[in-house]
């Protein structure tokens, strides 16, 4: 307890000069929410000679700072820390004087990650700890997971939203590459990265946002570049399947490892499809809906990929009754291994009945948001919540609204958890879990 208190005092001084919102750390750490840092109270306060000891040994290395964060405060501390790192290895023997490095790291595990940039302002040891990425790996091992919502409602611009503390934050804009300003693009959050995929006239392009550096760089190209594919992530890995490649509609699939930054080709699906959606449920990856290559046939089937056996199973009629094909790909999300869908035509939310391979209407979607056949509307899972993100014009300007609902046996009860003056159309949305 003493270590946690000293941690809060140390970070309060750093937060007072930052761009963080008005909530104090002590208020955040004591507020109860099932969507905040899960199972954090089960993390031991000090771990002797185990994973924490090994973790700290990994920090004894030089760390270079990426440029172009777009945040003066972050660039300021980044420049200072880089100057210090140039002179030799960072000393991480003590993070908070008097409590020891293991207890200090244990405190950091409990700290909401939206404050990690404030932590990095304390000293070079904290900076190295945050930038190395090892702190996030240790959080995963301790089953500490937070969700952050990222959405793009203006061309090239992205905003972040912390649903636990209900506060917005900004990240740098994407580089002004023409294909991202004039055409559709796909996005995917995996590990501590966001991947954004686009297609130029002559080639595909991938941009990668790193939470560790708060900057955009060129991302890794797939083995078979594509667009309009289905995708989903689990931890540090993600799977993409289908889409449109250089020679038409694809049945191929690939696995992305965000730590190794590599793409691995997987077995192909039974059916080639584009404009489809992907998700994980019960430990397996699914692709649902979309269109086939032949005469733009709308597909009502889905496919299930078993990661252990490396095999695909066709599921007839799983997408029957869902939107897709003629509009946006099916809007689907999984909460607690239950599949939900947003019907943008009837403005209803539905739940998938696994036993009967059918859909049950639960109630209405929130709001009257701007969309074109489902485009411009985001439907995602965020911890134990379903979220709907939509835009509208209000008073001559655009407003983005985030609504959430924790599924239960009752009717949908949507609550507005965030609003922001921005565009009135959601181009992309991704939820990062780390």
Image: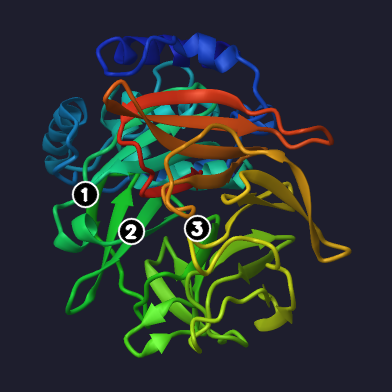
- Residue 127's tag is none
State the residue in front, 157 or 165: 157
What colouring does the structure picture have? Answer: rainbow
Instruction: Tell me which residue sits at (19%, 47%) in the image.
Output: 64
Residue behind mark 2? 196
Q: Which of label 1 and label 3 is nearer to you?
A: 1
Residue lying furthest right: 355
- Residue 236's tag is 3
Mark 1 and mark 2 in contact (Cβ < 8 Å)?
yes
Q: Where residue 153 sits: x, y (%)? A: 32, 41
Q: Is residue 45 above or below residue 357?
A: above
Pointer 2 local density, CA inside 10 Å: few below 14, some 14–19, many at least 20: many
- Residue 174's tag is 1
Q: Where residue 390 sits: x, y (%)? A: 46, 38
Instruction: Tell me which residue sits at (62%, 69%) in the image.
Output: 288
Give the structural element (helix, strand or loop) at label 3: loop
State the residue in front, 143 or 344: 344
State the residue in front, 175 or 227: 227
Q: Quadrant of the N terminus?
A: top right
Q: Is residue 217 above or below residue 305?
A: above
Mark 1 or mark 2, which is nearer the start of the sequence?
Answer: 1
Instruction: Tell me which residue sits at (19%, 25%) in the image.
Output: 73
Q: Where residue 412 sits: x, y (%)? A: 72, 33
**How far is the residue under mark 2 from the one under mark 1?**
9 Å
Pointer 1 local density, CA inside 10 Å: few below 14, some 14–19, many at least 20: some
Give the structural element (helix, strand or loop) at label 2: strand
């Amino acid at each position: 307890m003493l270590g946690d208190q000293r941690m809060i005092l140390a970070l309060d001084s750093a937060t007072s000069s930052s761009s963080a919102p008005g909530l104090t750390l002590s208020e955040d750490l004591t507020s109860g929410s099932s969507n905040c840092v899960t199972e954090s109270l089960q993390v031991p306060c000090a771990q002797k000679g185990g994973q924490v000891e090994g973790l700290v040994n990994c920090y004894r290395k030089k760390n270079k700072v990426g440029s172009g964060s777009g945040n003066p405060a972050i660039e300021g501390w980044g420049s200072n820390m880089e100057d210090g790192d140039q002179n030799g290895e960072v000393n991480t023997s003590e993070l908070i004087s008097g409590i020891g490095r293991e207890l200090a790291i244990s405190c950091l595990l409990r700290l909401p990650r939206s404050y990690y940039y404030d932590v990095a302002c304390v000293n070079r040891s904290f900076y190295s700890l945050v930038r190395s990425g090892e702190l996030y790996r240790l959080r995963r091992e301790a089953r500490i997971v937070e969700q952050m919502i990222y959405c793009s409602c203006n061309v090239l611009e992205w905003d972040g939203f912390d649903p636990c503390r209900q506060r917005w934050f900004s990240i740098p804009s994407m580089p002004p590459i023409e294909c991202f300003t004039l055409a559709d693009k796909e996005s995917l959050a995996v590990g501590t990265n966001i991947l954004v995929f686009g297609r130029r006239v002559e080639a595909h392009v991938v941009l990668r946002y790193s939470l560790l550096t708060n900057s955009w760089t060129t991302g890794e190209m797939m083995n078979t570049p594509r667009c309009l594919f289905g995708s989903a992530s689990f931890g540090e890995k993600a799977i993409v399947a289908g889409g449109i490649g250089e020679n038409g509609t694809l049945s191929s699939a690939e696995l992305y490892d965000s730590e190794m930054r590599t793409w691995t080709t997987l077995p192909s699906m039974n059916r080639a499809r584009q404009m489809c959606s992907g998700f994980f449920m019960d430990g397996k990856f699914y692709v649902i809906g979309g269109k086939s290559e032949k005469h733009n046939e709308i597909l009502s089937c889905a496919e299930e990929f078993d990661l252990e056996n490396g095999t695909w199973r066709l599921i007839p009629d799983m997408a029957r009754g869902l939107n897709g094909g003629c509009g946006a790909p099916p809007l689907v999300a999984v909460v607690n291994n239950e599949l939900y869908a947003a019907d943008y035509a009837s403005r209803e939310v539905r739940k998938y009945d696994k036993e009967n391979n059918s859909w049950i209407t639960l109630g209405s979607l929130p709001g009257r948001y701007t969309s074109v056949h489902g485009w411009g509307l985001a439907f995602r899972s965020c911890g134990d919540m379903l979220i709907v993100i939509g835009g509208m014009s209000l008073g001559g300007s655009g407003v983005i609204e985030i609504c959430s609902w924790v599924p239960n046996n009752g009717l949908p009860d949507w609550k507005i958890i965030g609003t922001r003056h921005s565009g009135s159309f959601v181009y992309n949305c991704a939820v990062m879990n780390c």
